[in-house]
Amino acid sequence: MNQDLSNFSMRELFLTESETQCRLLSDGLVALEIRPGDPALLESLMRAAHSLKGAARIIGLDGAVRVAHAMEDAFVSAQRGGIVLDSAAIDRLLRGVDLLSRLASVESPDEMKDEVEAFVAGAAAQKNDTAIPAAPTVAEPTAPSGNADDDVRSLRVAAESLDQLLGSAGESLVASRRIRNFSSDFWRLHAHQRKTAALLESAIASASAGEDVSATLRQLQTMIESGDRIVLAGLADFERFERNSSQLSQRLYGQALACRMRPFGAIASSLRRAVRDTARRLEREVTFEIRGEGTDVDRDLLEKIESPLLHLVRNAIDHGIEPPGERIAAGKPASGRISIEASHSAGFLVIRISDDGRGVDSADLRSRIVARGLTDAGTAEKLAGGELLEFLFLPGFSLRSEVTEISGRGVGLDVVQSTVREARGMVRISSDHGQGTSFVLQLPISLSVMKALIFEIAGEPYAVPLARVDRVMSVPAADIESIEGAQYVNFGQSRIGIVDGALVLARQTQNEPREAVDILLLSSGEGRFGIVVSRFLGEGEIVVQPLDRRLGRVRDIAAAALTEDGSSMLLLDVEEFILSVRRLAAGGQLHGITAKSSEAGKAARQILVVDDSLTVRELERKLLSSLGYAVEVAVDGMDAWNAARTGRFAAVVTDVDMPRMDGIELTRLIKNDPRLRDTPVIIVSYKDREEDRLRGLDAGADYYLTKGSFQDEGLARAVADVLGEDPQS
Amino acid sequence: MKTAFFQREPSAADRERWRSEIAAPPPSANGASRLVLFVFRVGGERFGIEPAHVEHTAPLPGIHSMPHRGVSVAGVVNVRGTVTLCFSLADVLGCAACPVANRPMLLVLIHEGWRVACRVDDAEGVSSFSPSALQTTPTTLEAAGRSHVRGIFESGSGSGVGWLDVESLFNAFDAAAR
């Protein structure tokens, strides 16, 4: 391998260039399929292949030279009318594009020699106008980007944005020098005051000596007036400065932010490609439309949502768009429509993906939910449209009985949802049976700035995204009522349980009697709660900063920010915070149950149940509670690890596939911790292949059960076994 | 093919000169080279750390506590516009906290790109020490397995100065953060 540093940077340059050219090629080929033989398109395709060939030759990437050459050749032949680029040919050429982008990014392109040869041979065969040979089997293309992700992150920023930023920064530097004027104003005022004071002193002396001081007094009066003028002039100046400076800061910030923005259209090419490939593979006809390509999106956010969006458009074709025959029979045009639209609305980035396909059949969905044992038929009947569609976001839930190549990519709707939530956004689904489905993603425009409500808990500032606040209120202490020790307030028709925020965060509470308490209403899928805070500080735009990554995941806390006076504050993770509140509330109830069952003479043993599905969690909790165990729940591996490391659990029951930290990692952490090593871990998963089982047991799990085990008491038996108890007792 | 100046291959002679310069031992000062440390106080104890790891010191700002973390994590502070993790050195080093800190300071340390803030009871500044004055740490500390001190410099006046082992200290920070 060549270790030469200068060569390395050339390689980087080539990677950058190949990204641009491959996007041109990919877009052009997809367009060519719609407008076959378009001379302008062929010309630009030819030029892109040619440039890439030249660049590859410079860095001596022989494989890429050959592939690019073969492609260029094909375009030239097509220009001369020698060959017709039909869909099969375009398929092959698109594979060539993939091959090129992989050649540009892999460490040892030499290893791809066979693929290169197969491609070149295929191209030659086509040129000779023989029958198109069977496409060489090419490995699934891996994502070309991200490989060169070293420790030092670099961004490509439009020169214009950077120039603007630099301009404002220069202006700010000049403006800051004006502050010196103010201090000289102050000094001038100070000198003037001293003079006035001295004159006053002499006037007092003269007056006590019985002299006439009226002239001096008049002089004093003028001096005070001129002093006042100095103050007023300085003040006007200062106010002007303040106004300019705050405008400048705002502009500076906006421009710095713009450097982080990319147009939504930057991922248009991979979306078009995904639609084209999927439609072709599944033999559907699809018209694809992208609107709002110029919409600005934070580049980190765009990177984050690209794969969920790709999944959603593939899904729309796989599950939505019917085969042409079926569509015509249903009275629809043979070609299906999929559209994706990005726009800014009310301070959010909204992305809507709609199709005019078959939509979701509620009856079918209900029966699948029941078949999966997620609920019983009676409850399923009662579920309304939105609630019903929510089930589609459960991990491993699919409307397909068979795993197709498209849906088997390892990204499910659950991952779409968790990715969107991680970006502090939300996703909604709506569907009309027979008419189509649409997904709406609502995301913050930038990951770093947001409107927030700021308040104090235990004397320290905290914030929540304003979008997540249902309401704030101040309730007279007398209006707080309680049932069985749980406090609540009446709000409209409903009673809302209230919890002291300091208790949730395990801070010192200040138990001073108050006439009224400030309450923040928060809600999530887990319920609605009132959080008692020390006081509200107001709302404002905050610049979110990540916490030091070495802290790992801190429960209830999403990030940090600075207040206006420059002190630090923490941003609450609303979803998690509500879970913690729920857990506190449930803990109280559980202690009650525990107290009763301990009449039998043994204290109930605590079991931690970990699953990201509310349904499964509740099912397991009920099952184990009914056996007399005290159950606590956690929503994912990270949450569970936070709870488990207190060491108070007799056993842990965990799922495998969970966001943030999966069950395997959790098991490994527990089994590698000297204090927790002996805690039995039972894995309960939908994954029932032998290799999944082995993976779980390798991590140190004591049991590996599949989720069918709820019915046949497998879980009860396993728990009794690891705890060394007779399940019948 | 023309190559831009900065993409040009360095000549063989240049490479050879660089190689020999890098391979040569660092020039040492004549006579006994003294060790320079930044000295600060935590509780009743004094510690020293190489100045290269001290980014700056500042009067102690407000520290926002961090929920669900141990006492070693004092919280987060604003260090020049960046919310930075702040440790209580008294807890990390296991010293008795100072009952009355007359000059509490924030010490911003950096090691391998990781910047952390620490609360200390006083910052004395830079002093130099003779390597011959270095004494080993009391065996009781080592037995406890939590010593982050490479040795102790006894000075004529006042208490000794513990020479902190940066690697070990930052490992302790890392463990305390989780």
Image: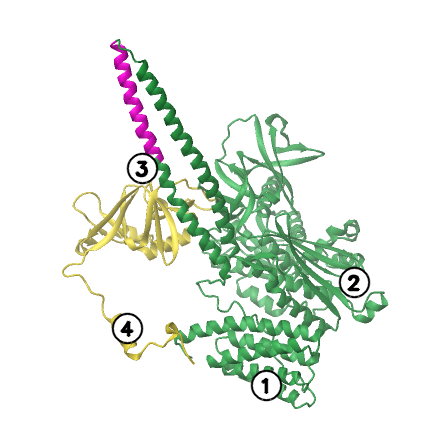
Q: Main secondary structure of the magenta part?
A: helix
Numbered disc 1: what chain?
A: A
Secondary structure found at label 4: helix
Query: How far apart, in angstroms, are the residues tagged by discs 4 and 3?
Result: 51 Å
Q: Residue furthest front?
A: A215
Numbered disc 4: what chain?
A: B
Secondary structure found at label 1: helix
Q: Colour of chain A?
A: green
CB within 8 Å, label 2 to label 1: no
Q: Which residues are magenta?
A: A185-209
Report the residue at 35% width, 51% height from top.
B109
Query: How far apart, in angstroms, are the residues tagged by discs 1 and 4?
Result: 45 Å
Residue at numbered disc 3? B101
The verdict on residue A351 being magenta is no
Report the residue at 57% width, 32% height from top.
A518
Kind of residue at badge 4:
Trp
In the image, residue B71 sits, relative to residue A355, either above or below, namely above
Residue A530 lies in what quarter of the image?
top right
Residue at numbered disc 1? A120
Kind of residue at badge 2:
Arg
A381 displayed left or right of B24: right
Q: Nearer the viewer, mark 2 or mark 3?
A: 2
Q: Residue furthest top?
A: A210
Residue at numbered disc 2? A358
Residue A449: percent from the left, percent from the top? 53, 49
Decide which of A511, A198 is in the foreground and name it.
A198
Q: Colour of chain B?
A: yellow
Residue at numbered disc 4? B18
